[in-house]
Image: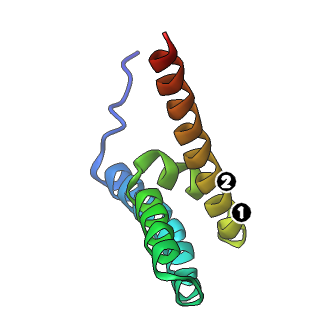
């Protein structure tokens, strides 16, 4: 028995729609936090915007955020931000350890 190729046009359209929905979930949540920047001082505002921008550009983060229902989009964004921060901490620890050697 032969297997059927799953790359049919309708499957590609479904995947594209799923990808767009995933992108929209995180994008909408990031957009919802844009007004928060106005309460921040300029240096914090720049950092805040950079963090949100980096989250929205990372395909892994977008995909992870889409794994949750749209009602959990804030939680997804927070988890993405925490993950991004933890990665940065790990990189800094590695650099410091390398410098000490």
Residue sitting at 57 percent across and 80 percent down? Answer: 33
Residue sitting at 36 percent across and 57 percent down? Answer: 16
Q: Which mark is residue 54?
A: none
**Label 2 element class:** helix
Residue 36 seen in render: yes
The front one of 40 and 52 is: 40
Q: Please tell me in which quadrant of the rendered image residue 36 appears.
A: bottom right
The front one of 37 and 16 is: 37
Give the CA distance from mark 2 to mark 1: 6 Å
Q: Are the residues at dot 2 and dot 1 in contact (C-beta closer than 8 Å)?
A: yes
The residue carrying pointer 2 sits among few (fewer than 14), some (14 to 19) or many (20 or more) residues within 10 Å by Cα, namely: some
Give the residue at mark 1. 75
Give the residue at mark 2. 79
The residue carrying pointer 1 sits among few (fewer than 14), some (14 to 19) or many (20 or more) residues within 10 Å by Cα, namely: some
Residue 81 lies, in percent from the top left, at 60, 56
70 w.r.t. 2: above or below: below
């Amino acid at each position: 028995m032969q297997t059927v190729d799953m790359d049919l046009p309708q499957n590609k359209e479904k995947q594209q729609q799923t990808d767009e929905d995933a992108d929209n979930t995180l994008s909408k949540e990031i957009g919802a936090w844009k007004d928060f920047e106005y309460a921040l001082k300029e240096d914090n505002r720049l950092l805040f915007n950079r963090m949100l921008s980096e989250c929205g550009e990372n395909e892994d983060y977008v995909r992870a955020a889409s794994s949750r229902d749209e009602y959990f989009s804030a939680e997804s964004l927070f988890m993405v931000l925490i993950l991004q921060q933890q990665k940065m901490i790990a990189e800094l620890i590695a650099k410091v350890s390398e410098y000490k050697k």
